[in-house]
Amino acid sequence: GEDVEQSLFLSVREGDSSVINCTYTDSSSTYLYWYKQEPGAGLQLLTYIFSNMDMKQDQRLTVLLNKKDKHLSLRIADTQTGDSAIYFCAEYPQTGANNLFFGTGTRLTVIP
Amino acid sequence: DTAVSQTPKYLVTQMGNDKSIKCEQNLGHDTMYWYKQDSKKFLKIMFSYNNKELIINETVPNRFSPKSPDKAHLNLHINSLELGDSAVYFCASSPGLAGGQETQYFGPGTRLLVL
């Protein structure tokens, strides 16, 4: 199966930038996603990037894609306490089954 | 209005019981999914349904059976529940099968605890 890796934990101070990293295995993945899961809640789509893009910016969120290294990152500017959550990257491989493969999730803790 | 809804939100039951989790989407999507999230937060696909046909079935025990009465509903029935079935089960839907550009929208999850 696909292998999507993330660091498990990240702590930042309120107001700083957070960078959450993800590596994936299928170079043919067409779309890569970032989902947010707050405690006790479901998955909320944050943003996604098409594989022919290097960068996508959406307000405080910046997604960077290095297709050569199969590396995806999510930068959150001016991190707030409400950003504390688990962040999952997911890939949609071109080959194989029609479903998302999720990373292990990164638990972001924002320190006031 | 809730786009993808699941019931119940919490389910506590004894080992060996049979239970069902319901999922409904009001987005008019053609494809629905069930994911399992274990205690370590790992998310794995279990099933997906497109136009009432099962199109993928990962290595899931046959005690789990998805049932889709219509394209807006995908229910998950679990027979002979085991302790290891304790997890959060997420339903999701997407417009179709065009391959990845169709974002999946997730329900709030059903927290299943088997005692």
Image: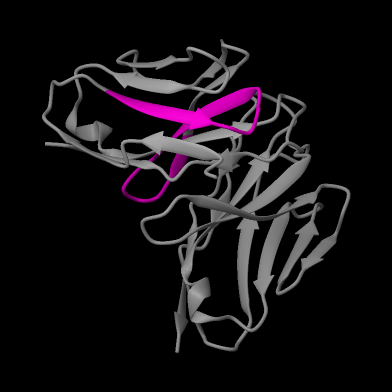
Q: Is residue B7 left or right of residue A80?
A: left
- Residue B38 lies, in percent from the top left, at 35, 43
A21 left or right of B100 in image: left
Can see residue A11?
A: no
The question of residue B29 being in magenta is answered with: yes
Residue depicted at 53% across the width and 14% down the height:
B70
Query: In what quadrant of the picture does the N terminus of chain B appear?
Result: top right
* Predominant SS along the magenta part: strand
Indicate the quadrant where residue A56 lies.
Answer: bottom right
On the image, the x and y values in percent for residue A39 come to 38, 61
- Work out whether residue A33 can be spotted: yes
Q: Which of A90/B91 is in front?
A: B91
Name the quadrant containing residue B59: top left
Quadrant in which the C terminus of chain B is drawn: top left
Most distant residue in the right direction: A52
Residue A110 to residue B93: above or below: below
Which residue appears at 78% of the width and 58% of the height? A65
Residue A21: image location, x then y, percent: 62, 64
Task: Judge whether B27 appears above or below B69 on screen.
Answer: below
B114 displayed left or right of B42? left
For the point 83% across and 63% down, the residue is A55
Range of the magenta residues? B20-44
| Residue B54 picture location, percent across and down | 55, 12
Number of marks in the image? 0
Which residue is at the far front? B1
